[in-house]
Image: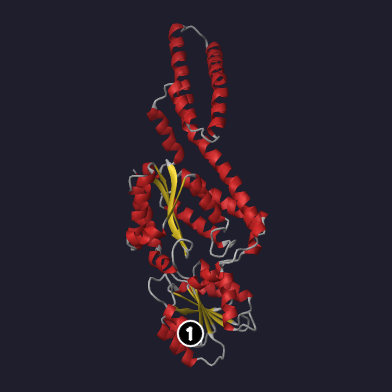
């Protein structure tokens, strides 16, 4: 089996395509289940954020895997395969590992160096674990990616080079609302949504000195909890339009499939406002919450994902990026060696199991030929035979694991199976138990 990732992001697709391809939580779950049911895939995980959708799988056939994963992404996103394919990228084996590690470090983010992607990778892993679609391969990969991302942020200055998408978006919004002030203090804010992005936005607004924060969410309990955490107040989702007139800043990030704020709602709110400053709207949702036509409304300043992509085009400090790339390269080499070594483990276990069976058989035969042995003598003979076998197997099994961890070392497992005439079914059984094969677990 080999690791494959098929996906699209802000680097490969325009915002309009990303918006159309965005997946709800239910759609992600169904996509994972259907991927696992597909013939080429043994494991699956999906990383979906506001600017990327990536499907990871452990597959036994590359071309069939690419075709199947691409088709599934098209079916579940509702974007035609002909429209989607030109924007898809494919990474395989080491390149797939390199891609996820780079993503975890913020090197592939819209705002290079932002750390929120780590939480999104963790969520992707948790979903795969909850649905039993992630086995040993993807568990190892995603957990290592989280460690690599944390290492990059702790050992380099990549945090200074980039910001979270929320922080960056609010900074861009502040410039548009009041170029002279350049900040968000003494404003009233409306946060629409109560997920992780909205929570981060509310906390950031509170630290910026916003006078009042109002939270609206479809689930009232979540709105009240978020509002309480920042000293604000919660309102029903149905009152979003009514709150606009008394608001200076709107941050929206919901999972809605349709618009939350259309052009007419913004125009109506502007007619009732008394503030001379523009109404600032930051739309972090994918698909979008705020009608793009609001860009053309006088008195409103909209910043959305497309605007952020353009504003974040400049590279951050080259030295920090280079330092993170070196970490990624080293971690890829270490991960690859560990995975190659792990692949030979089922063969080594099967060999030792076979040796133990031979020892047990010969000791039973000895009991039949020498029935007068007392318990002490029998124990001494048993220990001696097992010790001889262990010593004979120790050096070759340790060495074969070392050799298997090197590039091109995959053939050592085949050689070991051939030399000792190991039963392929026995090796496969150990492998399934060792990897926690999701397909086996769901059978």
| SS assignment at label 1 | helix
Q: Is residue 193 left or right of residue 440?
A: right
Task: Please provide percent x and percent y for residue 48.
Answer: 45, 60
**Rendered residue at 45%/18% (across/down):** 358
> In terms of image quadrants, where is residue 171?
bottom right
Q: Please state which of residues 43 and 416 is positioned toward the viewer in this rendering.
A: 416
How packed mark 1 is, by other alpha carbons closer than 10 Å (few <14, some 14-19, many 20 or more), is: some
> In terms of image quadrants, where is residue 369?
top left
Task: Please provide percent x and percent y for residue 280.
Answer: 53, 81
Q: Specify the quadrant that holds the N terminus.
A: top left
Examine the rendered structure and indicate whether residue 30 appears above or below residue 366. below
Examine the rendered structure and indicate whether residue 289 appears above or below residue 39. below
Q: How is the image coloured?
A: secondary structure
**Rendered residue at 47%/30% (across/down):** 411
Examine the rendered structure and indicate whether residue 169 appears above or below residue 211. above
Q: Is residue 113 visible?
A: yes
Q: Please state which of residues 277 and 231 is positioned toward the viewer in this rendering.
A: 277
Task: Please provide percent x and percent y for residue 343.
Answer: 48, 35
Count of labels in the image: 1
**Residue with the mark numbered 1:** 243
Task: Please provide percent x and percent y for residue 244.
Answer: 48, 85
Examine the rendered structure and indicate whether residue 119 appears above or below residue 145. below
Q: Is residue 55 visible?
A: no
Q: Specify the quadrant that holds the C terminus.
A: top left
**Rendered residue at 66%/63% (across/down):** 160
């Amino acid at each position: 089996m080999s690791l494959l990732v098929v996906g699209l992001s802000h680097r490969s697709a325009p915002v309009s395509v990303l918006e159309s391809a965005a997946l709800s939580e239910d759609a992600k779950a169904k996509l994972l289940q259907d991927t696992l049911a597909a013939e080429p895939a043994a494991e699956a995980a999906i990383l979906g954020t506001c600017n990327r959708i990536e499907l990871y799988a452990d597959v036994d056939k590359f071309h069939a895997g690419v075709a199947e994963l691409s088709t599934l992404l098209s079916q579940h996103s509702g974007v035609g395969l002909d429209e989607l394919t030109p924007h898809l990228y494919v990474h395989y084996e080491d390149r797939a590992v390199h891609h996820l590690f780079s993503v975890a470090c913020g090197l592939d983010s819209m705002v290079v160096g932002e750390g929120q992607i780590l939480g999104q990778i963790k969520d992707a892993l948790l979903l795969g674990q909850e649905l039993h679609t992630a086995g040993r391969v993807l568990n190892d990969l995603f957990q290592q990616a989280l460690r690599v991302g944390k290492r990059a942020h702790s050992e380099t200055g990549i945090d200074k080079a980039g910001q979270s998408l929320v922080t960056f978006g609010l900074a861009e919004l502040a410039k548009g609302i009041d170029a002279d002030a350049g900040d968000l203090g003494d404003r009233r804010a409306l946060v629409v949504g109560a997920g992780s992005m909205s929570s981060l936005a509310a906390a950031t607004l509170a630290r910026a000195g916003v006078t009042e924060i109002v939270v609206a969410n479809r689930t009232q309990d979540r709105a009240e909890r978020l509002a309480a955490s920042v000293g604000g107040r919660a309102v029903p989702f149905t009152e979003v339009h009514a709150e606009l007139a008394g608001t200076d800043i709107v941050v929206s990030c919901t999972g809605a499939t349709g618009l939350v704020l259309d052009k007419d709602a913004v125009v109506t709110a502007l007619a009732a406002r008394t503030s001379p400053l523009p109404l600032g709207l930051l739309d972090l949702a994918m698909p979008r919450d705020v009608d793009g036509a609001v860009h053309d409304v006088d008195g409103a300043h909209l910043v959305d994902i497309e605007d952020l992509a353009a504003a974040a085009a400049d590279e951050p400090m080259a030295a920090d990026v280079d330092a993170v790339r070196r970490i990624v390269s080293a971690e890829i080499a270490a991960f690859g060696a560990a995975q190659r070594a792990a692949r030979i483990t089922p063969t080594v276990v099967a060999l030792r199991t076979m040796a133990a069976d031979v020892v047990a058989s010969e000791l039973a035969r000895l009991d039949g030929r020498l029935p007068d042995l007392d318990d002490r003598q029998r124990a001494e003979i048993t220990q001696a035979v097992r010790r001889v076998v262990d010593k004979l197997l120790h050096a070759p099994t340790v060495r074969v694991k070392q050799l298997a961890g090197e590039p091109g070392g995959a053939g050592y497992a085949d050689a070991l199976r051939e030399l000792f005439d190991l039963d392929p079914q026995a090796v496969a059984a150990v492998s399934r138990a060792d990897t926690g094969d999701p397909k086996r677990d769901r059978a």
